[in-house]
Image (cartoon, coloured by chain):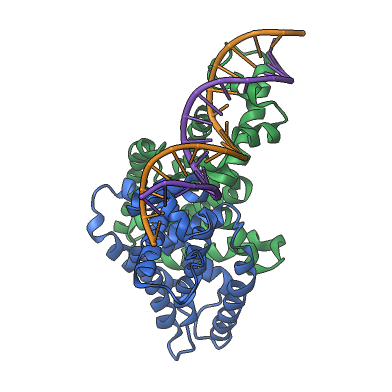
Chain colours: A green, B blue, C orange, D purple
Amino acid sequence: MARAAATKGQTRIQREKTEQILEAALEVFASYGFRGSTIDQIATQSGLSKPNILYYFDGKEAIHAVLLGRLLDTWLEPLQSLSDSSTPIDEICAYVHRKLEMARDFPRESRLFANEILQGAPRLLNELQGPLKALTDEKAALIQNWVDAGKISAIDPHHLLFSIWSTTQHYADFDVQVRAVLGSCEGDCFQTAQAHLDHMFRALLKP
Amino acid sequence: MARAAATKGQTRIQREKTEQILEAALEVFASYGFRGSTIDQIATQSGLSKPNILYYFDGKEAIHAVLLGRLLDTWLEPLQSLSDSSTPIDEICAYVHRKLEMARDFPRESRLFANEILQGAPRLLNELQGPLKALTDEKAALIQNWVDAGKISAIDPHHLLFSIWSTTQHYADFDVQVRAVLGSCEGDCFQTAQAHLDHMFRALLKP
DNA sequence: GTCTATACTGTGATAGAC
DNA sequence: GTCTATCACAGTATAGAC
């Protein structure tokens, strides 16, 4: 019974195959959403057979749950590391920079998350109301301190975070639209975006 | 044969029922995406029977197509009306304002669109590369003129539009997350957002 | 024009051979 | 541990009564 995907005592092969499945599932779930994805697609994508996948995981839902579980940790890490600093504007812009890098390097994770939220976060609501809210409130308080100290302009911390999240993740989630509108100059799209967002948030935050 | 949903010569009842179906379908498609939605759900939501729905439309795909077709017209209308003006900053902020109002008043339309883009825009790609790109390029040129004339700060017009789209639509598409993070102060969430975005884009655009 | 009953297909999951 | 074969069910769509 290898089905406990979180079990420690796995052989190397077992670990490799579960990773192989999760990798394929991330690709598929990010592209088609939970309901739109089929185990068949994951099987084809991973090069394994359907029953073999169901040997390693207790079903479609279980695979999705593992992916979501891993997601939030890595997803919130940049915000975690937003810390007090003598130069708050640089600190926030560095956060914007990291978020944009994640949108570029992990677009599938971004879309997996977006799909989930967009459809009402049925499998993630508790995480949002618990850990996410706690972390957000903590960092919002930090930002509010900077406002009160006159180090940055008087903005609403929560809505600042919303603006950072939305503008950066847009380049992953709405990638198709971005490329359709920009034509075929994808090469430096992220560089231009980086400069634009840096400019925007510096202008906003300047006291 | 009433199946041609676009047919003109419809009775009052036929028009009412097709509207009833489209209204229900918008609700369902926006919540669950195309694949995640079933005709059963649309039937329940609309109070009609499943075969009755398939009498009025040629299938699930056809209903979705009608919704998407209507969407782009209304969706791009605010950008259409962005016009030359002696006070470009007010003009752009008015556009932001209209977009945010649409996110508040038509969240289902926003989510229908987001679902479609997120999953690669399989049924909308031509519209994006054609009409959307044309309109965007036209308005980007207008904004570039304002930049060249020194009326607003030196920003990239396309990325400015991306930032406007993402920040405003975020309040519709990621509504669940916004409410989870803010707690239960939804009452004035859109007012606060409005003030925040106005502040942000004015700071960005000030020459 | 609308309903009931049903055919057909795709999908999640299991049984049992190897 | 992995595969082939298959079940059970949900979902789209149609046929035909009314």
Q: Is residue C18 placed above or below A155 in the rendered structure?
A: above
Task: Identify the residue shown where x is 37% and y is 63%.
Answer: B17
Left or right relative to A94: residue B28: left
Task: Identify the residue shown where x is 31% and y is 53%.
Answer: A144
Q: Is residue A77 placed above or below D14 in the rendered structure?
A: above
Q: Is residue A66 placed above or below A162 in the rendered structure?
A: above
Task: Identify the residue shown where x is 29% and y is 57%.
Answer: A148
Task: Identify the residue shown where x is 44% and y is 57%.
Answer: B111
Can see residue B57?
yes
Instruction: Please identify the quarter of the rendering in which residue A1 is found.
Output: top right
Q: Tell me where residue A139 appears, x and y as whole percent.
A: 37, 46
Q: Tell me where residue B26 appears, x and y as whole percent.
A: 41, 58
Q: Is residue A64 placed above or below A33 in the rendered structure?
A: above
Can see residue A89?
no
* Of residues A29 and A93, the one drawn nearer to the viewer in this rendering: A29
Q: Tell me where residue B183 appears, x and y as whole percent.
A: 27, 47
Q: Tell me where residue B207 appears, x and y as whole percent.
A: 48, 80
Left or right relative to A83: residue A107: right
